[in-house]
Amino acid sequence: MVQRRRRRRPWHRTRAYRLLRTAVLVVVLTTMWSRCGPAGPGRAGGRDTVAAKGADSAREEPGAAGPATSAPPAPPRPLSRSRPTSFRVPSLGIDAPVTPLRLDRDRQLETPPVDRPKLVGWYEGGPTPGESGTAIAVGHRDTRSGPAVFAGLAQAKPGRTVEVRRVDGRTAVYSVDRVKVYDKVGFPDEEVYGSTGRPELRVITCGGLFSRRTGYTSNVVVFAHLTATK
């Protein structure tokens, strides 16, 4: 029996060729990835790399992370003592002269004269506007002759300003914090008149229901703090 000769496999089907082909493919893919992949730190990129850097500059570049946030302004320094001369609430159209007030025999704060309904009263036993402590201003809501200086005081909005000009030429500017209505029975004296350690202002008028026999049942109180001087 004649033994057949084994044919040689074609070169392109040998194991050595397959291994070489795999190695070449790995090298090619690695090279392509290094050229076309995302640019890493320190890599010198072409046009696409520059574009990517521009799109991400707000995230990568110091100082380009968005608008800078500034610290809140420092509170103004309190003013020295000087009596007030005029009282303004621009948002309510109030611009009135000021008169000093004292406590009566019952230790209650007086009110401006009824025959001068457009006058604002200032408690002269307390701080003057702009001084440290809580300054007190009062005025009528109405009189028999009609609406008075603080007829619209309950409509004051937080953030609006109150300006008090003084005899020394300075002006204390307050920003409204809140508006409260308190019953006269059980009125919170400490909350309204107490000092908070910074220059503040309370503006007070009548509110609530009205009776000819007893007057108004409540008080409207505007709380404000000093935000500027000029």
Image (cartoon, grey):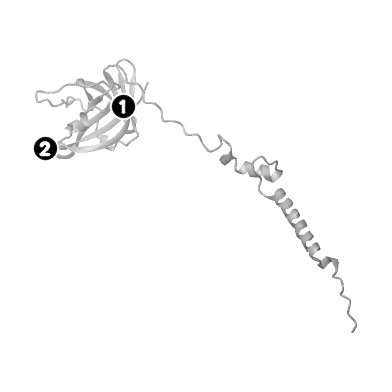
Q: Position of residue 5 (x, y in %)?
A: 89, 76
Q: Residue furthest right?
A: 2
Q: Nearer the viewer, residue 38 or 219?
A: 38
Q: Residue furthest front?
A: 1
In the rendered image, which quarter contains the C terminus?
A: top left
Q: Is residue 153 above or below residue 136?
A: below
* Pick the front one: 134 or 180: 134
Q: Position of residue 190 (x, y in %)?
A: 19, 31
Q: Nearer the viewer, residue 139 or 201?
A: 201
- Identified by mark 2, the residue type is Arg
What is the quadrant of the N terminus in the image? bottom right
Classify residue 195 as left or right of residue 64.
left
Amino acid identity at mark 1: Arg
Sequence-wise, the earlier of marks 2 and 1 is 1
Residue at image x 81%, y 68%? 13
Location of mark 2 (residue): 212
Find disc 1 in the rendering and name its residue: 88
For the residues marked 2 and 1, what is the alpha-carbon distance in whole angstroms? 30 Å
Residue 98 seen by the camera: yes
